[in-house]
Image (cartoon, rainbow, N blue to C red):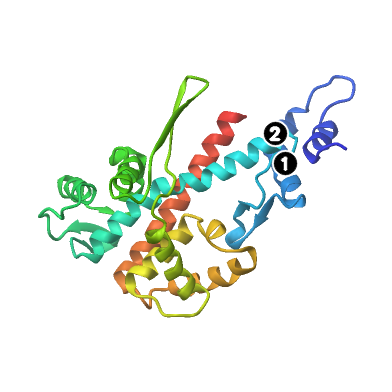
Amino acid sequence: MLSLAEELLLLALDDEKGTIPGSAQQALAYGLPAAGLVDLLLAGRLVMGEKKRVTVAEATPTGDDILDEMLAQIERSKRQALTYGLPAAGLVDLLLAGRLVMGEKKRVTVAGATPTGDDILDEMLAQIELSKRAKGIGDWVKGFGNGGIKKLRERLENRLVESGVLRVEEGRFLRLFHWHHYPTVDGAPEAKAREKLRRVLLEGNDPDARTAILISLARTCDLFHPLFQKEERKRADERAKDIGKGEFMGEAVSKALQEVEMATTAAMVAIMAASTTSSG
């Protein structure tokens, strides 16, 4: 049985010349991947959630190399969201601590530049303090996520290794590519965080400000899929949307998180667009 993309391509090709009409070439550049995505939706490998965003429901190989590549890219995009979610978490920590304030046009400025005792947060403060112009929190999320804070994820992982929460495993793939994995050693801190989210999102407990922020950041980074069972996700997402309106975290932080979500979404769309262009 042909895939939708194969059928679409056959319809587009001139039977005798074996070419695609010029009028259809540009549209087909988007139509063929669209057909692949629909095939994955029909097969139950992708699911469409809120705001028509798709997530991987089943990542095992389909037997079709093109569809498998699509699945892999979508799965990777979820992990890439952390590229922006992690600096966003740091910026919100600084807002909560009163080290940053959000002013006119949602631009952030440093309220207190004395060291926090956290090297990553201090680096963020220093960069914001030295900036020649005030920027919005979304600009800082993108800037820090795009390399403004060097090796952010690796530094956080190393901290968790040093504190005994994770351990590091290293190796090489095909003797060329060096990799690191970070299995859990002490599951208590993550279990505590998961339980906080479950009590709020599924049992209806009111969150404190920090938990409300964690929920909003987890939702922005598309982490509900691994955190909740299929039958729980809709209820968790609806509750998270209510919490995101700001009742439990204050107006300033709520506005900051809205900026974070918009910046992260825009950055992820750009990543996916670039990936699609390069693979085409």
- Residue 104 in sight in this render: yes
Can you say which quadrant of the picture contains the C terminus? Answer: top right
Q: Residue at x 10, y 55 (%)?
A: 114
Foreground residue among 43 and 202: 202
Q: Residue at x 48, y 61 (%)?
A: 219
Q: Position of residue 168 (x, y in %)?
A: 38, 39
Asked if residue 49 lies left or right of residue 104, the reply is right
What residue is disc 1 on? Answer: 36
Q: Name the residue type under label 2.
A: Ile
Going by the image, does 263 lie left or right of 100? right
- Depth check, front residue: 136 or 26: 136
Q: Kindly identify the amino acid type of the residue bearing the numbered disc 1.
A: Gly
Q: Position of residue 58 (x, y in %)?
A: 67, 49
Which residue corresponds to mark 2? 66
**Distance in Å between CA atoms under marks 2 and 1:** 8 Å
Residue drawn 56% across the image and 63% down it = 228
Judged left or right of residue 71, residue 190 is: left
Residue 70, above or below 189: above
Exactly how many numbered labels are in the figure? 2
Looking at the image, is mark 2 or mark 1 earlier in the sequence? 1
Residue 233 shown left or right of residue 186 in the figure: right
Q: Residues within 10 Å of mark 2 (few under 14, many from 20)?
A: few
Could you tell me residue 101's position as x and y percent? 21, 63
Which residue is at 83% across, 21% downward? Answer: 18
Quadrant housing residue 151: top left
The answer to whether one can see residue 143 in this image is no
Percent x, y for residue 206?
41, 80
- Mark 1 falls on what kind of element? helix
Give the camera-side residue of 35 and 155: 155
Is disc 2 in contact with disc 1, using a CB cutoff of under 8 Å?
yes
The answer to which quarter of the image holds residue 216 is bottom left
